[in-house]
Amino acid sequence: MQLAERVQRISVSATLAVLMEAERYKARGVDVVDFGPGEPDFPTPEHIKRAAIRALEENRTKYTATAGIAPLRQAVCEWHARELGSSYQASECIVTVGGKHAVFNAVNALVNAGDEILIPSPYWVSYPDIVKYAGGRPVFIPTDAADGFCLRAERVERAINQRTRIAIANSPNNPTGAVVPPEEFARIFDACKRRGVWLLSDECYSHFTYGSAKPFSIASLPGAKEHVIVAGSLSKTFAMTGWRLGYALAPAPLVEAMTKLQSQSTSNPNSITQYAALEALTGPMDSVAAMLAEYARRRTRILEGLRAIPGIACAEPQGAFYAFPNVAACLKKNGAGGKPADGGEPDTSTVARELLERSHVAVVPGEAFGAAGFLRISYATSMERIEEGLRRLRQFFGSGS
Ligand SMILES: Cc1ncc(COP(=O)(O)O)c(C=O)c1O
């Protein structure tokens, strides 16, 4: 079949492919420890679910304004101001079908063929494909495990040229959990502003930070709003992945362009979901704090457990709910595939496949994020499953040594 060239430029999300393979094992009755999911294991808080039920009973089932119902756009701005210190108006906000859709709309509203978009690496799988779909060219900015995978302004600055249109920042980061400290973020912003480059700040994990790292938005800096696009999501913060609700905050003309694009693609996000989101953003935040406390406990355990496996090195994740260990040093010992004879890139896709086949542990290989040699381990699963998963990982990486 002859498909459009723009569709042939992109591929199916690599993380979704792993999840589907793990599902096939589970469907056969296999007891899989699933470290794959990029979503909270908690249910959506009760008060949010009740708001959705109310919306249904009140027949809030019609089309809404494309950019979202007015009270929700206002609530997004007020929540962001309260939680993260920004000062947006409703005209600078569009409600989207998830945070991914906010990134998609922003990139497609700004990027011309051949424009370069800077993407910190390791990266969330969807950035390069969204950029390629829009006709842009992804340019990767490396971050180092030894530096906690922190994005550095100096590297952003060095990568900017006349074709650069957008620099993406994702803090806390998926897959590394890295958090860019506010001072470094300000330097990144400064480099972008001086060189006329948009800074697209993906804040989908904003509220999941640990230790001294705190929720932070670059949009809170005085004078930043004109050069920044915030992509946000209720998916992770409020355990609402299936509801599909995100937002973008940006200068009004850009929000208008994104709204035009949305009006010819998805139209408004689901109306019931919008009323649930209104409750999430205006109601109590206790459940978010409770989820964070549990993630913090699991993070400590998984980090300790991974570091105790000989050969595994793991930078301390300061945010999100992922650990991103380097397993390259383990590969030749355990009879698992993965260690190249020629000293080239380790093949962690093979390791992930063997882990699932032999030990029934699902993880996402680093290749999906542009980082061979690493595995992404989601700790959005119960402490009990974490213990069992660590036991199987110890056995897998220890065997044959
Ligand atoms: C870094 C990052 N941005 C955005 C998203 C999009 O999430 P959603 O579309 O569910 O809001 C994800 C989801 O995994 C993510 O990891």
Image (spheres, rainbow, N blue to C red):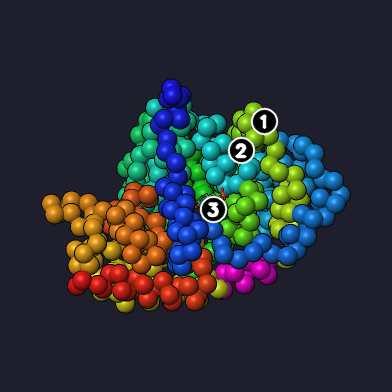
Count residues near mark 3 (Cα–Cα under 10 Å), then give few for <14, some for 14-19, many for 20+. many
The correct choice, above or below, for 208 with respect to 140 in the image is: below
Q: Secondary structure at mark 1?
A: helix
Give the residue number, with chain letter if any, for mark 3: 203
Position in image of residue 69 (x %, y %): 76, 43
Q: Which mark is residue 3?
A: none
Is residue 79 in sight in this rendering? yes
Q: Residue at x 36, y 67 (%)?
A: 359
The correct choice, above or below, for 164 with respect to 334 in the image is: above
Count residues near mark 2 (Cα–Cα under 10 Å), then give few for <14, some for 14-19, many for 20+. some
Position in image of residue 8 (x %, y %): 41, 30
Q: Earlier in the sequence, mark 2 or mark 1?
A: 2
Q: Which mark is residue 263?
A: 1
In magenta, the rendered stretch is 285-293
> Please, what is the dominant secondary structure of the magenta stretch?
helix
Give the residue number, with chain letter if any, for mark 2: 251
Real-space CA distance between mark 3 and mark 1, rounded to the nearest whole angstrom: 24 Å
* Residue type (three-letter) at the residue carrying disc 3: Glu
Q: Residue at x 64, y 42 (%)?
A: 96
Contact (Cβ within 8 Å) of mark 2 with mark 3 = no
Q: Earlier in the sequence, mark 2 or mark 3?
A: 3
Residue lying farthest to the top in this orientation: 2
Q: Secondary structure at mark 2?
A: loop
* Residue type (three-letter) at the residue carrying disc 1: Ser
Position in image of residue 111 (x %, y %): 48, 30
Q: Residue at x 49, y 64 (%)?
A: 29
Q: Which quadrant would residue 191 be assigned to in this image?
A: top left
